[in-house]
Image (spheres, grey):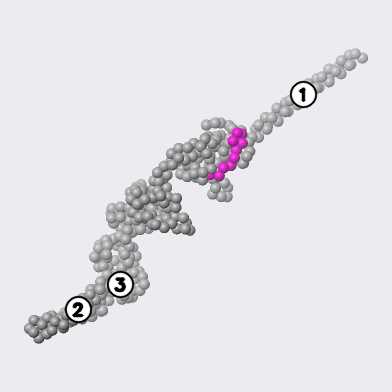
């Protein structure tokens, strides 16, 4: 009786020890599994620094002056001396119209001038009156003015040195509402009109220098100047217009070319984070940054400024010194706990 009892107690003790060992091992395995379930992330830190406020605006090149070549009254076109794209000089004859009316006015002018000279002769020999001379002088002045206006509207010349940017008729056509030709002045400067945001109104001023780049001339940067700021803000877009003038030696810059205008608005203290910290929300254009608080993260929407190499300027959403997640965001959600893999 004694030996079986001792044997039974030994077996119970061994079983209890085995159960305790197995139970402890299972708890450790569960703890390890729970630890591995936490998303592992890398972190970095947001920091404030002075960031140059360089903004880029896009626009198309325009001629400094645009002149529409057209007669004051409808007339039939006789000749057009230029084509679209041709360079022209100031005073160059571009278009001649039907001269029938001009010829008639020249006949009337010559007749009035002869009558005036005859009246002067009669007055000198005492056979005429001063009143007749004065009347003919007034008629002569009116005839000269009428002839000069008709000549100006029959032989059309260029008021500027530039290039023909449009031609709307052919010889034999009757002029109507459209100009016969359009001439753009491309030297010494051309211009672009940019739309700047309302917040830039106090930092853009007349005479400030800007940089201008053109897609057609990718290896060059041109110097421009703010020449004019339009006084009103568009209430629909909350923008205002500013005219930028760019020197154009050799008339290499042509109307319609795409321009990028860079304006330096000074510098401001901004929060900067690594570019890896910024994530885009699927299905929208919103950007977010995960910020670590203790062992949990928050999903902060941010407003981006400029890209600074491998970092981003933030306008809002993250504070100086915040701990931000730079790797492992695909497994994250707002408010969940994480396992920090590495601290930069």
Graded by Cα atoms within 10 Å as few (under 14), some (14 to 19) or many (20 or more), the crowding at tag 3 reads many
Residue beneath disc 2: 138
The residue lying toward the viewer, choosing from 306 and 128, is: 128
Q: Residue at (89%, 14%) from the top-left corner? A: 3
Which label number is shown at residue 199? none
Which label number is shown at residue 71? 3
| Residue 234 falls in image quadrant | bottom left
Q: Is residue 175 visible?
A: yes
The Cα atoms of the two marked residues, 1 and 2, are separated by 131 Å
- Of tags 3 and 2, the one toward the viewer is 2
Is 294 inside the magenta-drawn segment?
Answer: yes
* Range of magenta residues: 293-302
- Of tags 1 and 2, the one toward the viewer is 2
Q: Is residue 2 left or right of residue 318?
A: right
The Cα atoms of the two marked residues, 3 and 2, are separated by 26 Å
The disc, 1 or 3, on the residue closer to the chain's N-terminal end is: 1
Graded by Cα atoms within 10 Å as few (under 14), some (14 to 19) or many (20 or more), the crowding at tag 2 reads few
Residue beneath disc 1: 20
The Cα atoms of the two marked residues, 1 and 3, are separated by 109 Å
Is 300 inside the magenta-drawn segment?
Answer: yes
Q: Secondary structure at mark 1?
A: helix
Q: Quadrant of the N terminus?
A: top right
The residue lying toward the viewer, choosing from 63 and 318, is: 318
The disc, 1 or 2, on the residue closer to the chain's N-terminal end is: 1
In the rendered image, the residue lying farthest to the bottom is 127
Q: Residue at (35%, 74%) from the top-left corner? A: 176
């Amino acid at each position: 009786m004694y030996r079986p009892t001792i044997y039974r107690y030994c077996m119970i003790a061994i079983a209890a020890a085995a159960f305790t060992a197995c139970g402890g091992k299972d708890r450790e395995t569960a703890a390890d599994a729970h630890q591995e379930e936490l998303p592992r992330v890398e972190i970095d830190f947001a920091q404030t620094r002075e960031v140059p406020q360089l903004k880029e605006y896009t626009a198309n090149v325009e001629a400094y002056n645009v002149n529409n070549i057209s007669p004051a009254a409808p007339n039939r076109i006789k000749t057009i001396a230029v084509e679209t794209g041709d360079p022209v000089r100031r005073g160059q004859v571009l278009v001649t119209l039907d001269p029938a009316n001009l010829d008639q006015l020249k006949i009337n002018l010559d007749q009035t001038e002869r009558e005036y000279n005859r009246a002067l002769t009669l007055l000198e020999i005492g056979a005429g009156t001063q009143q007749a001379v004065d009347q003919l002088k007034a008629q002569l002045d009116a005839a000269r003015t009428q002839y000069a206006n008709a000549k100006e509207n029959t032989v059309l010349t260029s008021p500027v040195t530039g290039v023909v940017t449009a031609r709307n008729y052919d010889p034999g056509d009757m002029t109507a509402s459209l100009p016969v030709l359009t001439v753009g002045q491309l030297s010494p400067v051309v211009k672009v009109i940019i739309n700047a945001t309302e917040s830039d109104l106090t930092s853009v001023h007349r005479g400030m220098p800007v940089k201008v780049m053109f897609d057609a001339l990718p290896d060059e940067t041109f110097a421009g100047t703010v020449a004019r700021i339009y006084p009103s803000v568009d209430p629909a877009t909350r923008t205002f217009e500013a005219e930028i003038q760019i020197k154009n030696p050799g008339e290499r810059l042509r109307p319609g070319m795409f321009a990028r205008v860079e304006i330096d608005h000074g510098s401001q203290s901004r929060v900067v984070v690594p570019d890896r910290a910024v994530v885009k929300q699927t299905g929208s254009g919103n950007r977010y940054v995960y910020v670590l608080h203790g062992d949990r993260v928050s999903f902060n929407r941010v407003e981006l400024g400029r890209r600074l190499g491998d970092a981003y300027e933030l306008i809002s959403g993250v504070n100086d010194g915040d701990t931000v997640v730079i790797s492992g965001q695909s497994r994250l959600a707002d408010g969940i706990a994480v396992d920090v893999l590495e601290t930069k």
